[in-house]
């Protein structure tokens, strides 16, 4: 079967799979009042459903999988999810995005289960600012887990959402960190979602302004690899680590889109800010449904828009980033 491709010539070897919408943080830009479960919502996909989903996607050329949430470590069977994914033929990169609260405790278990790359949300290296953003004073333990992952040889990237007048002036601290740490830091431009408009207006800062600073300091833009995420990545010969910039409001941001998303309950999202979800769960109930699932996936990709509509203030059906996996 031909790889998933849309009418604009983009191919999609990269799937972001949310395994749970719940999160144990209260980040100001996502869930400032904490996570509140919908008592009427369906439960997350089971291991068997996840395995069937992934086999359908790999048949269409998916080979990079990122496990997301909410916070994926809230699921007690996370190691089982990782083992299930690692056993699917065709998946060559199994990554995860986490807030890192359980990283130091479960790193070896996750790696033994098949995890081979990790992103950790670290919105500030200042302990007080980190606690202000996330609602939890956990930075030292999270950074200890990051150090353990680096020592174990696991590729690590740290995600920091840029917030005006909160953490947007902390580049010098990050540069000090990157001199010695072989990690990537990804600065992510704050995005408007369905429920954060006042916060967005108060704290949005264009990520491109940070790129200007980096270029003026000798950081060089690297060529984009085929299955990379949306970051524009920079390196500097004087630093061990690298910097990535995710600027969704920049021109042509969507031209290089190569990823699809599936929510924790099995809805296919063609775009993080799309206007609809496509329920796949009914096609994940038996192994014999694989051909039907593959046909459904191939048929839906033609509905993907050329770009998002964030510039128009249209955030689709995404109320907050935890609901879809960011």
Image: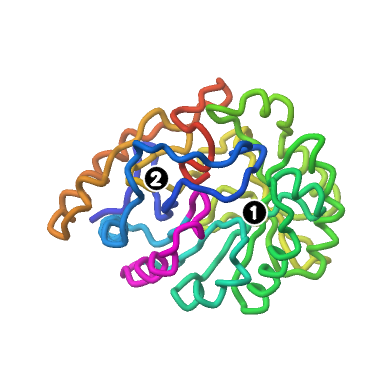
| Magenta residues, start to end | 68-90
* Residue sitting farthest toward the top: 312
Q: Residue 2 in the image: x percent, y percent?
A: 27, 53
Q: Which residue is mark 2?
A: 263
- In the picture provided, is 315 more to the left or to the right than 52? right
Q: Residue 121 in the image: x percent, y percent?
A: 64, 54
- Secondary element under disc 1, as helix, strand or loop, is strand
Q: How is the image coloured?
A: rainbow
Of 245 and 145, nearer the camera is: 145
Q: Which residue is mark 1?
A: 121
Q: Residue at x 80, y 65 (%)?
A: 239
Q: Residue at x 50, y 57 (%)?
A: 74
Query: Residue 274's image quarter?
Result: top left
Which of the marked residues, 2 or 1, is nearer the chain's N terminus? Answer: 1
Of 152 and 227, nearer the camera is: 152
Query: Residue 156's image quarter?
Result: bottom right
Residue 226 visible in this rendered orientation of the protein = no
Q: Residue at x 71, y 60 (%)?
A: 242
Callout 1 crowding tier (Cα within 10 Å): few <14, some 14–19, many ≥20: some
Residue 270 numbered tag: none
Disc 2 from disc 1: Cα separation: 20 Å
């Amino acid at each position: 079967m031909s790889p998933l491709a849309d009418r604009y010539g983009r191919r999609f070897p990269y799937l972001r799979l949310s395994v749970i919408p719940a999160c144990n943080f209260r980040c100001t830009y996502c869930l400032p009042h904490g996570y509140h479960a919908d008592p009427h919502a369906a439960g997350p996909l089971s291991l068997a459903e996840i395995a069937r989903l992934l086999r359908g996607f790999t048949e269409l050329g998916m080979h990079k999988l990122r496990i997301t949430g909410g916070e994926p470590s809230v699921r007690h069977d996370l190691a089982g999810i990782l083992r299930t994914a690692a056993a699917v033929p065709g998946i060559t990169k199994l990554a995860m995005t986490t807030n890192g609260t359980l990283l130091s405790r479960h790193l070896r278990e996750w790696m033994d289960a098949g995890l081979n790359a990790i992103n950790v949300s670290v919105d500030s290296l200042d302990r007080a600012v980190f606690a202000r953003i996330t609602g939890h004073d956990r930075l030292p333990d999270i950074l200890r887990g990051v150090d353990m992952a680096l020592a174990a040889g696991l590729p690590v990237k740290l995600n920091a959402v840029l917030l005006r007048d909160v953490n947007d002036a902390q580049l010098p601290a990050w540069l000090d960190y990157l001199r010695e740490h072989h990690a990537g830091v990804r600065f992510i431009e704050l995005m408007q979602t369905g429920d954060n408009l006042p916060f967005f207006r108060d704290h949005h800062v264009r990520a491109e302004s940070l790129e200007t600073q980096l270029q003026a300091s000798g950081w060089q833009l690297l060529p984009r690899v085929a299955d990379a995420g949306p970051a524009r990545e920079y390196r500097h010969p004087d630093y061990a680590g690298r910097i990535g910039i995710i600027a969704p409001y920049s021109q042509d941001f969507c031209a290089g889109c190569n990823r699809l998303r599936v929510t924790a309950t099995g809805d296919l999202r063609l775009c993080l800010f799309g206007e609809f979800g496509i329920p796949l769960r009914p096609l994940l109930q038996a192994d014999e449904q694989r051909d039907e699932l593959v046909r459904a996936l191939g048929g839906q990709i033609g509905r993907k828009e050329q770009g998002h509509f964030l510039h128009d203030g249209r955030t689709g059906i995404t109320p907050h980033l935890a609901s879809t996996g960011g």
